[in-house]
Image (tube, grey):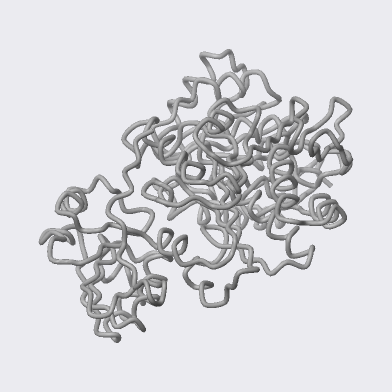
């Protein structure tokens, strides 16, 4: 496996910490991690310049705050026009591609290109549980965090689902546990691995960012590649890519599965009991039918969380209490409302065909599926087959990928009704309300990114929830 982590950061050996005083540092991207980097470097007396493709108007209050701090700012579509060769260090936010010409040029010149994640892994005095995979990271990471907290551990949740990692660094000690949700963007140039690495289902994603599927998978591999023989890799036995990571690490291996028995880890028996297993000794956690999380894909997330939390010293009572009381995260198969016999589910976080298919399979009753959005380089063939072979009765399509999803569904034999051409969430829900019947499910599970019609997946989900709420004022015969 090629490892392209880039030059190592300089460290002050006496203090075992990085010395950035008077160093010229470029921070690329003013998202959550970029702002966290500014907070981290400001007291270290570094000479900061921040870069972002957005305009001052788009940055809004962020731009005004940075100007008050007298920071140098380069913004707009030509924000990298002068290159980055004048800096001692470059720190990129996760959304900033390593393939940008200015970044490639700087790396070739030997300038360290790093990230908040790399700093955190180097400086963290506690133990890290890193959670990655194509989908399910947020749910699994939150479950692990809640279980460890219930077990009395000092634990912190960081990453996309929690706080920026650098913000919690001053509060950590050797007994701290940190649950870190890790995307491929954060892993891509990582040069350390967590003490416990959890690898969920891995399939093609983010091909609008990564140049190939291979590059995406290579990024994921970093979560186990640098582990030691004292560490643990918790791998998905049902996914060949995840299971194949076992050959890349020196760590001890623990598996989770919803289809087969595993010797070390967690699995779902044929009688649908969730089992924790260690060297053949088994503990029954309970029936998966009692989980509040919908969908069989969540059996995997729960099993992964239980196995990882147990390795971190969680108690069995804490594991049972949390996994059977956890109702899920916002925008992940979230039950929004039940209005006159119709249930509305918000799965806006579903931005791949695979996660949309998993959401569809969670229901046996008739489904009106709202899908579509912007391009991520996905193949909708299998999603089309799932739609055609499921209880989906009506397909409501939005966004640029509408025609591709419709084509895949019709080719697979979908015989239901197709609605397309609606340009707002308000119009979508009003149309849905005209055709939905008591006992049916309305499911927003787009299978696509959101950037053609919405700011992000959160905005899409929030608009859906708002319009569902507005439906309460309508009356319809047969619903009362």
Q: Is 198 left, or right, of 24 in this rendering? A: right
Residue drawn at x 55%, y 25% is 383
Q: Is 434 left, or right, of 249 in this rendering? A: right
Whole-percent x, y for residue 455 in the image: 43, 55
Whole-percent x, y for residue 122 in the image: 44, 62
Residue drawn at x 57%, y 73% is 172
Nearest the eye: 415 or 113: 113
Disc tally is 0
Whole-percent x, y for residue 331 in the image: 61, 51
Nearest the eye: 203 or 79: 203
Residue drawn at x 82%, y 56% is 315
- 4 in relation to 50, above or below: above
- 236 in relation to 49, above or below: above
Nearest the eye: 159 or 31: 159
Q: Is 390 left, or right, of 224 in this rendering? A: right
Whole-percent x, y for residue 192 in the image: 45, 52
Q: Is 117 left, or right, of 201 in this rendering? A: left
Residue drawn at x 48%, y 40% is 422
* Quadrant of the rendering where the N terminus is positioned: top left
Looking at the rendering, which quadrant does residue 365 occupy? top right
Looking at the rendering, which quadrant does residue 201 occupy? top right
Looking at the rendering, which quadrant does residue 290 occupy? top right
């Amino acid at each position: 496996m090629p490892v392209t982590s880039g030059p190592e950061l300089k460290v002050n050996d006496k203090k075992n910490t990085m010395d950035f005083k008077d160093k010229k540092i470029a921070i690329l991207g003013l998202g959550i991690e970029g702002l966290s980097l500014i907070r981290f470097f400001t007291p270290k007396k570094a000479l900061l310049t921040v870069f972002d493709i957005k305009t001052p108007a788009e940055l809004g209050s962020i731009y005004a705050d940075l100007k008050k701090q007298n920071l140098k700012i380069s913004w707009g579509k030509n924000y990298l026009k002068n290159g980055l060769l004048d800096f001692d260090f470059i720190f990129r936010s996760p959304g900033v591609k390593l393939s940008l010409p200015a970044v490639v040029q700087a790396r070739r010149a030997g300038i360290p290109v790093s990230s908040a994640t790399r700093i955190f892994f180097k400086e963290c005095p506690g133990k890290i549980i890193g959670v990655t995979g194509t989908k399910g990271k947020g749910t699994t990471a939150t479950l692990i965090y809640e279980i460890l907290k219930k077990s009395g551990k000092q634990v912190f949740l960081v990453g996309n689902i929690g706080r920026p990692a650098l913000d919690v660094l001053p509060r950590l000690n050797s007994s701290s546990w940190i649950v870190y949700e890790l995307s491929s963007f954060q892993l891509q140039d990582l040069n350390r691995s967590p003490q416990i690495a959890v690898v969920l289902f891995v399939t093609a994603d983010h091909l609008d960012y990564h140049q190939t599927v291979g590059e995406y998978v290579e990024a994921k591999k970093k979560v186990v590649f640098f582990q030691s023989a004292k560490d643990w890799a918790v791998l998905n036995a049902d996914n060949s890519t995840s299971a194949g990571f076992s050959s890349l690490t020196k760590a001890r291996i623990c598996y989770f599965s919803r289809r087969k028995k595993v010797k070390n880890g967690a699995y779902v028996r044929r009688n649908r009991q969730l089992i924790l297993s260690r060297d053949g000794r088994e503990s029954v956690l309970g029936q998966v039918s009692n989980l509040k999380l919908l969908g069989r894909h969540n059996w995997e997330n729960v099993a992964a969380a239980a196995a990882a939390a147990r390795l971190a010293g969680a108690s069995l009572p804490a594991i049972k209490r949390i996994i059977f009381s956890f109702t899920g995260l916002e925008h992940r198969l979230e039950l929004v409302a039940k209005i006159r016999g119709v249930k509305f589910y918000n799965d806006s976080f579903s931005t791949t065909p695979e996660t949309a298919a998993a959401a569809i399979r969670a229901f046996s009753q008739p489904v009106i599926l709202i899908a579509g959005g912007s391009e991520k380089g996905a193949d909708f063939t299998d999603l089309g087959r799932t739609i055609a072979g499921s209880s989906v009765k009506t397909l409501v399509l939005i966004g640029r990928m509408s025609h591709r999803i419709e084509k895949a569904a019709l080719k697979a034999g979908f015989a239901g009704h197709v609605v397309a051409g609606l340009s707002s969430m308000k119009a979508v829900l009003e149309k849905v309300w005209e055709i939905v019947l008591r006992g049916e499910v309305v499911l927003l599970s787009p299978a696509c990114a959101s950037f053609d019609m919405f700011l992000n997946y959160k905005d899409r989900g929030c608009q859906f929830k708002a319009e569902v709420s507005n439906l309460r004022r309508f009356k319809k015969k047969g619903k009362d």
